[in-house]
Image (cartoon, rainbow, N blue to C red):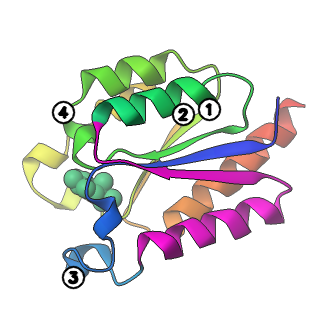
């Protein structure tokens, strides 16, 4: 197992900080990625941060990191609620998958209450703001320690 964590952000998360700041806060995607890199480094891990608005690019990234890594942190954005293809890719993962949402999706519209990603996730975080990404990486580090 290598020491890399994939942090994968889906559609519209490139607009963090500009998009609905009342829901998602003022931090930018660059802030999220810096937080992930520094948190990973604290635990001797490396965060590989990717973002795409395209479903197939997200799937290709999952394929790339699905075996032999320290795990995947995924915020699939709206694809969380719609994408069987992303679920299928995550089901092919041999590493732990942590689902992360900045907002508390359960407090929002009914269509955000169902997650395909959750069906393949080891754990789910929602409503912690961008701190959720750091918690997810911390948990992956703990799983890694426990596993070997
Ligand atoms: C989100 C919640 C989703 O419902 C939404 O489509 C997003 C962001 C979150 O981080 O809270 O794009 O995943």
Q: Local crowd at mark 2 within 10 Å, few (<14), some, or many (≥20)?
A: some
CA distance for labels 3 and 1: 31 Å
User: How many residues crowd around disc 1 within 10 Å: few (fewer than 14), some, or many (20 or more)?
Assistant: many
Q: Is residue 92 above or below residue 48?
A: above
Distance CA(mark 3)–CA(mark 2)? 29 Å
Between residues 104 and 45, which one lies in front from this camera angle? 45
Up-down relation of residue 84 to residue 9 (above or below)? above
Could you tell which of marks 2 and 4 lies nearer the N-terminus?
Answer: 4
Q: CA distance from mark 4 to mark 1?
A: 21 Å
Read off the magenta span.
Answer: 28-54
Q: Residue at x 75, y 53 (%)?
A: 46
Residue 96 circle label: 1
Image point 19% across, 76% down: which residue? 20
How many callouts does the rendering have?
4
Task: Give the numbered dot on residue 82.
Answer: 4
Q: Indicate which quadrant contains ligand 1.
A: bottom left
| Coordinates of residue 116 in the picture (x, y in percent) | 29, 30
Q: Residues within 10 Å of mark 4 (few under 14, many from 20)?
A: some
- Which residue is labeled 2 in the image? 122
Mark 3 or mark 1, earlier in chain: 3
Outermost residue to the right? 148
Q: Is residue 139 magenta?
A: no
x%, y% of residue 14? 34, 63
- Mark closer to the chain start, 3 or 2: 3
- Whether the residues at callouts 1 and 2 have beta carbons within 8 Å, the answer is yes
Residue identifier under label 3: 22
The disc label shown at residue 76, or none = none
Residue 147's x, y, as percent?
83, 30
- Looking at the rendered image, the disc whose residue lies closer to the viewer, 3 or 2, is 3
């Amino acid at each position: 197992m290598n020491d890399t964590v994939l942090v994968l952000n889906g559609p519209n998360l490139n607009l963090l900080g500009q998009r609905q700041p009342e829901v998602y806060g003022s931090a930018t995607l660059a802030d999220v990625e810096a937080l992930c890199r520094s948190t990973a480094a604290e635990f001797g891990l490396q965060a590989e941060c990717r973002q795409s608005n395209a479903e197939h690019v997200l799937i290709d990234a999952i394929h790339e990191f699905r075996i032999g890594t320290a795990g995947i942190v995924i915020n699939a954005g709206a694809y969380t609620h719609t994408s069987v293809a992303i679920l299928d890719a995550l089901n092919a993962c041999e590493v732990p998958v942590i689902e992360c949402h900045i907002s508390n999706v359960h407090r929002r519209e009914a269509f955000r209450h169902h997650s395909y990603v959750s069906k393949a996730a080891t754990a789910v975080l929602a409503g912690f703001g961008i701190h959720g990404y750091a918690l997810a990486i911390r948990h992956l580090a703990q799983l890694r320690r426990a596993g070997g």
